[in-house]
Amino acid sequence: MSNSEIYYSHFYPLLFLIPAFAAESIDCPPFRIVTRKWQTSTFDLATLATRHKLHLPYQLMDVLLSQCNLELSVGQYKSLEEANKAFRAFRIGAYSVGLSPFLCPFVSTHSINEYSGINSRDNNALGESLHPGLRDGITSDSAQIEVWPVELSLRSIIISDAISVKEQPFREASDHALKWLSLTKQFPALLALEEATIASPTMGDQSQSLLHIWSALESLFPTVSSEVSFRVAIYIAQLTQTGANRLDCYTKIRSAYGIRSKLAHGSKTSTTHEEWNQAWNILIDCINALVKRRHLPTEQELIQEIFS
């Protein structure tokens, strides 16, 4: 399917991320990432509230959009539910290629670049005062905009040196997203990992976030109930590494799991960003291994690999 045949109908503002590509947009169907071109006035958002369908306060949209420089559009999915599944898969894909965690406050039927300036365009007397690039566009008579909440928060752990979106990583993230969608259809148990991966950075508190990361990792091995640190470390090392790398990986994972255990049992009350980042990287390594394998191995399959 060519880019021209993709109809983009769901739009997701991406908070905290910044563009590091020359073009205004990058197409990698069914995903397109677009640079935000215009500021959206409070009057524009008030117009959406009075003449369109908002399922959240327009004042909250105003606050949240102050951190938005990029927008992801998702095409080819007819329902909001299917588009949201694809967006969540893109998020996993973006994290898998090293992009910082980010927030998405809402999803809309039209782009920010489309409804910016709508208040003035609705009023012929004000239209001439707009920037020339905003004078032609949708009005309340020509389009019906609908907006649904996704994450109404500004709380997220950010990796400050990984907020720039470049073209090649975006294309890799889009490819990983489609593979992840296929994986979760084949192995629905991975949806627990997906949910925990997306939720963990939004907890704000690093200690709770780290514990949530480990809950995501432990969901990969649901039958492990004894010798947990030993077995989880063995399985993750086998899942993500090959050859001699496995021993070093095992040692690091078991040490990282020890931090998780101290937090869970109360002997440690806080964690450093370095400790959080270590757990996050283990999680991302597992996601990349699953994408590469195109398969969710059982514990028994991993043991067979070790001794084969």
Image (spheres, grey):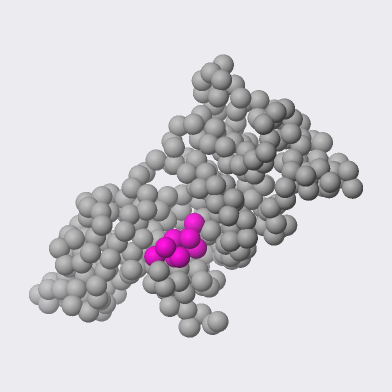
Q: Position of residue 212 (x, y in %)?
A: 53, 36
Q: Nearer the viewer, residue 145 or 14?
A: 145
Q: Is residue 196 above or below residue 211?
A: below
The answer to whether residue 285 is seen in the rendering is yes
Is residue 83 within the magenta segment? yes
Q: Position of residue 191 (x, y in %)?
A: 55, 51
Which portion, as a residue range, is magenta?
Answer: 80-88
Q: Main secondary structure of the magenta part?
A: helix
Is residue 262 within the magenta segment? no
Q: Residue at x 46, y 53 (%)?
A: 17
Given the current orientation, which residue lies at the most extreme top position?
267
The answer to whether residue 160 is seen in the rendering is no
Q: Nearer the viewer, residue 25 or 104?
A: 104
**Residue 111, quarter of the rendered image:** bottom left
- Dividing the image into 4 quarters, which one contains the N terminus? bottom right
Q: Is residue 85 left or right of residue 258?
A: left
Q: Position of residue 178 (x, y in %)?
A: 58, 65
**Residue 68, quarter of the rendered image:** bottom left
Q: How many marks?
A: 0
Q: Position of residue 303 (x, y in %)?
A: 81, 43
Q: Residue at x 46, y 55 (%)?
A: 18
Q: Is residue 45 above or below residue 268?
A: below
Given the current orientation, which residue lies at the most extreme left position?
125
Q: Residue at x 45, y 65 (%)?
A: 82
Q: Is residue 148 left or right of residue 21?
A: left
